[in-house]
Amino acid sequence: MPSRLACWSEKFCQLPVINAVSAIQRQGNTLVIERTLEDDVEVIELSVPAVLCVTSDINVPRIPSMKAILGAGKKPVNQWQASDIDWSQSAPLAELVGIRVPPQTERKHIIIDNDSPEAIAELAEHLKKALN
């Protein structure tokens, strides 16, 4: 889960949030979490439910062999309809409330192609005006 959304869930759902999770082990109703920080690894034990923000270290994907790749092309593809799984959609799952297009802003066309101190000061002034 992205960290901004995790902070929201901690504030509004009162769930504990742990970020930078690199390993998860479940032991009954508790989780043993490893957090990888800059120079060390923290081990945290917490109860569920909880919100975890994982890093890319959480999973090492398997690389398929050439035999598996070629075999995958020969496997049949099953296609199911809603009636095959006894599901009927009585109401839409989402409703489009509206579409808004952001307003177009006119570009300033300010080009400073110099790296002198005066040009840098001029750029800083333009940025200050644009941000205020």
Image (cartoon, rainbow, N blue to C red):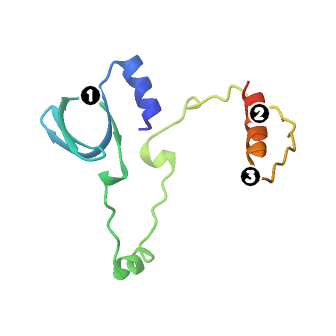
Query: Is residue 52 depicted above or below 76 in this figure?
Result: above
Q: Nearer the viewer, mark 2 or mark 3?
A: 3
Q: Are marks 2 and 1 in contact (CB under 8 Å)?
A: no
Q: Nearer the viewer, mark 2 or mark 1?
A: 2
Residue under circle 3?
115
Instruction: Name the quadrant containing residue 132.
Output: top right
**Image spot of residue 4 (x, y percent):** 46, 31
Residue under circle 2?
125
CA gap between label 2 and label 1 equals: 50 Å
Count neighbours of disc 1 (C-alpha within 10 A) and say few if under 14, some if 14 to 19, many if 20 or more.
few
At 31% across and 46% down in the image, what residue appears? 38
Earlier in the chain: of badge 3 and badge 1, it is 1
Q: Are marks 2 and 3 in contact (CB under 8 Å)?
A: no
**Image spot of residue 26 (x, y percent):** 17, 40
Q: Amino acid at mark 3?
A: Asp
Seen in the image, is 31 located left or right of residue 36? left
Residue under circle 1?
49
